[in-house]
Image (spheres, coloured by chain):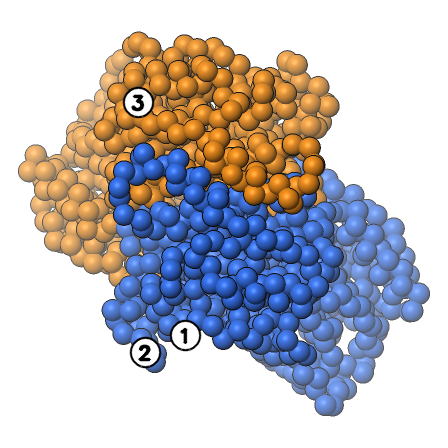
Chain colours: A blue, B orange
Amino acid sequence: MKITIAQLNYHVGNFNANTEKSIRIIRDAAAEGSDLVVFPELSVTGYPPSDLLERRDFIEECENAVDRIKEECREIAAIIGVPTINRTSSGKRLFNSACFIENGEVKQVINKTLLPTYDVFDEYRYFEPSNDFALVSYRGKKLAVTICEDLWDEQGFDNSFAPRRLYTHSPMEELARMNPDIIINISASPFSARRTEMKKRVFTGKAQRYNLPLFMANQTGANTELIFDGGSMVISPDGRIYDHLGFFTENVRSYDTDKIIMGHTPEPAYGEGYIEMIYKALLTGVRDYFGKSGLTTAITGLSGGIDSAVVTALAAEALGTKSVRALLLPSMWSSEHSLTDAIELAGNLGIRYDVVHIADSYNAVTESLKPLFDDLPEDVTEENIQARVRAVMLMALSNKFGNILLNTSNKSESAVGYGTLYGDMAGGLSVIGDLYKTDVYALARYINRNGIIIPERTIQKPPSAELRPGQLDTDSLPQYDILDSIIYQYIELQTPAENIEGNGISPSIVNKVIRMINASEHKRFQSPPVLRISSKSFGPGRRIPLVAKQ
Amino acid sequence: MKITIAQLNYHVGNFNANTEKSIRIIRDAAAEGSDLVVFPELSVTGYPPSDLLERRDFIEECENAVDRIKEECREIAAIIGVPTINRTSSGKRLFNSACFIENGEVKQVINKTLLPTYDVFDEYRYFEPSNDFALVSYRGKKLAVTICEDLWDEQGFDNSFAPRRLYTHSPMEELARMNPDIIINISASPFSARRTEMKKRVFTGKAQRYNLPLFMANQTGANTELIFDGGSMVISPDGRIYDHLGFFTENVRSYDTDKIIMGHTPEPAYGEGYIEMIYKALLTGVRDYFGKSGLTTAITGLSGGIDSAVVTALAAEALGTKSVRALLLPSMWSSEHSLTDAIELAGNLGIRYDVVHIADSYNAVTESLKPLFDDLPEDVTEENIQARVRAVMLMALSNKFGNILLNTSNKSESAVGYGTLYGDMAGGLSVIGDLYKTDVYALARYINRNGIIIPERTIQKPPSAELRPGQLDTDSLPQYDILDSIIYQYIELQTPAENIEGNGISPSIVNKVIRMINASEHKRFQSPPVLRISSKSFGPGRRIPLVAKQ
């Protein structure tokens, strides 16, 4: 049997584009004699459709798309991912389904059992879990069709104080009892930089355990925060990867099941370097945020510092140098190198830049407020006014010319609230908001891998917000390597304060950092969407009540 | 048997305060000879604890609180709401539990079966549903103890295109087979202005159906967006309300079960007027947001318009006139009455106000940007600069003096994106963000019920943002009664566009409004938390993917 894996980039709610893309692949695969095309989970809608699933017209569009795709499946079969209506009298409105289409008809509907409802996932909000299991019989083979976590039933917890396993059922165990010949998995599994190897182990482990060939089709591309890395796999029954479809790219490839059963040597490497994967993920995130929103041009505020440099370089790569402009907004406290480094970067990238001094606007604001401030000493208020005046300028350009402001906050400063709400925390999309400062440096080095783009001084100089004379980040924060380690343990691993440890980490630093994290939830509540590259980013995947006492 | 209902205001994560409050009630009830005190759902943690439930130390605090409360239950029993650890080998980490405590021990743990996972509720994110059912035997009576939606198993959908009922089980049916004597329900059921009567029907219907007395204990008070109205009920077996504990207030009252079985005539009215309930809800929301965050003082930008007038009046009532200050920020386009109406309001309220003209700052910004704007005509850019300069001023005062900026956007303008991000959309808390403009007017009239507080002209004049000469809201928007009706049908009832109807509503207006709603998701993503008074407010209860094609 010849099976085609379609690793595609779907746009949430864009039924026409998604359907036409799928139909094109079906026709091509039929022409080359494939028996079956496998599309990813929720390929009809894109992932995540979120509350659009509550709209009746949205579900009708799904049904129309299935009808169109059905017509194409005459010589060839297809497995597509689509929400289907729960026709019983009770339970959630929908199932998260895989439709097996053959001879122009939906022959079988397989509904997902294990519905991720943690972190960014809300599937039980919409879908009823299935407890029916059946194989799909097709051209002499019995297919075990599973949807994403249905094959990840050993899913555990990063920081478990209770059960060892999240799920109480194993759909694949049920299917295995029926003696399938092939395992198929359709997924919409987003990228998480530290989990590529783990994902590989889950799937290769399943193939080996059941001694069956396994085909996994994953989405690629991004929908706002969620970035899908593809990495669709074909695995031989001995648990070795036979082939994969690459990362952060659309790809369609066909396989003869007999060859897969025989295996492949050597096993192709799965995944790329940590920073290289992050780089590609962020390019995908920026490109799709713009492309899928019908936006084309971006603007950044270039400070001469590393964060804005990295974001601007990423944007120029993702959108093209003609589509990105920079605004340099020096103040009375900006050092000379801030301007020259920023200009050098803009020159290296070949993007347009303009310089607007903020002193006049800053002075007008502070002058107007003087009668109210009496003779109170300057404090963080005046620093925030600078950051906010910059945002006013950047948003004005954005409004006038349609360039979307990219936010340049990193995860370390977001975590501790080292940023100004409505100031440097503004923007339509946070590009590096899930990157620790130490990873921002690594990414800068990676961007310079073939020659200097980000000026060496931008990478070398000690980080400063330059909101008062001689200010350094380390005036208010621990060294970034220490800070990042604490944040990682506290936020991603959910380690209790007293167990956080490492070089240079003391209980007093831990407590200070945790206090800062807890005290800045209200700022993050109003942050732009963050491109997610870890297993726990700020945003909808992390829900902390604002008024909680912590 | 004498049963005490404790309708209390809990603070999320404030274990000490919550526990001491519960202990005080237990001691008082024991002293007056009560047999059993019933506390609301998750009384130990406050509701909603959200992702704090993923922290091991948070759960340890829960266990410590239970240990302290146990010690108090010697002569008296108590039912408390608390998360407990799932000790089996798989499934979610926790149960949402009711602990029955007697003789200093947790005698029985009842776990919740029906876990709301829709709108603002995420319970399946944390809790494993229970399928075990047992009565609690105590002093000769058999108690059917249920947790919130376990007694709402008929829960339907506002706009159903599929099953008639959300839940597949009925815990109370299971318990009824065991012949209980009394139904007890512990709830954390938030306020929704149009649902008071429905809630009453659910509970009175259950009492009547099983012909049993019913005691329902609900939380009161607010935790950020969610406002709990209390309204705890005691219902006779004939389905008539015997007593309730009032709305938006803490209350503790004891009942002799025999008297309840005999019933009470006349039946007390349940609920108050629509606008009166909203008024009390918003006062509770503001008061608790400040009180539970350790904040005391607020600031508003007073424009002379109705939205800022209503918010300022609410804040003055909730926090006290000494704790609220207003800033009047007239521009070159402000009409004279804007200033005089705002001053009159501040005078009526007796709050401090200051006037800062924004023209100098606005001119400094536009002057600085002039070289970049060339001779392009003025447009929405210049309007947004005004709104954003105002936010810079307001946030500067907030930073300097610690007053939290209250946002004054209403639901109608939020819905259609009629507001400036980082401008008038700024603030720590959105007070009336879940109120339609037409309800804002009704609320203004209610605030004036005992005499003029909000100047009549503020209520009478046609709404205007005053960002350009002669501007009126109706230049860009339909009449508010039409707009509000469309938004209500589309957002709250999820009516498909083609079925939206009413006086003055045409398909072209509907399509225009829906386009505006869909085009402004990115603005709402960065909005402050909104006090929720409807069944569908903007914020975490409504999750629309930003890049979706709609």
The chain letter under disc 2 is A
**Residue at image location 72% in from the left, 47% down from the top:** A294
Residues marked 2 and 1 touching at CB (< 8 Å): yes
Query: Picture coordinates of residue B235 (x, y %)?
Result: 29, 26
Could you say which is closer to the camera, residue B111 or residue B239?
B111
Work out whether residue A169 can be spotted: no
**Residue at image location 25% in from the left, 53% down from the top:** B108
The vertical placement of A261 against B3, above or below, is below
User: In the rendering, which numbered label is found on residue A116?
Assistant: none
Query: Picture coordinates of residue A454 (x, y %)?
Result: 60, 71
Query: Picture coordinates of residue B354 (x, y %)?
Result: 33, 27
Q: In the rendered structure, which amino acid carries the disc numbered 1?
A: Asp
The residue to which callout 3 is attached is: B241
Could you say which is closer to the camera, residue A114 or residue A312?
A312
The residue to which callout 2 is attached is: A504
- Tell me the quarter of the image containing the N terminus of chain A: bottom right
Could you say which is closer to the camera, residue A271 or residue B293?
B293
Q: Secondary structure at mark 1?
A: helix
- Observer-side mark, 2 or 3, equals 2
Q: Residues within 10 Å of mark 1 (few under 14, many from 20)?
A: some
Could you say which is closer to the camera, residue A400 or residue A155?
A400
Tally the numbered discs. Answer: 3
Q: CA distance from mark 2 to mark 1?
A: 9 Å
Q: CA distance from mark 1 to mark 3?
A: 62 Å
Q: In the rendered structure, which amino acid carries the disc numbered 2?
A: Gly
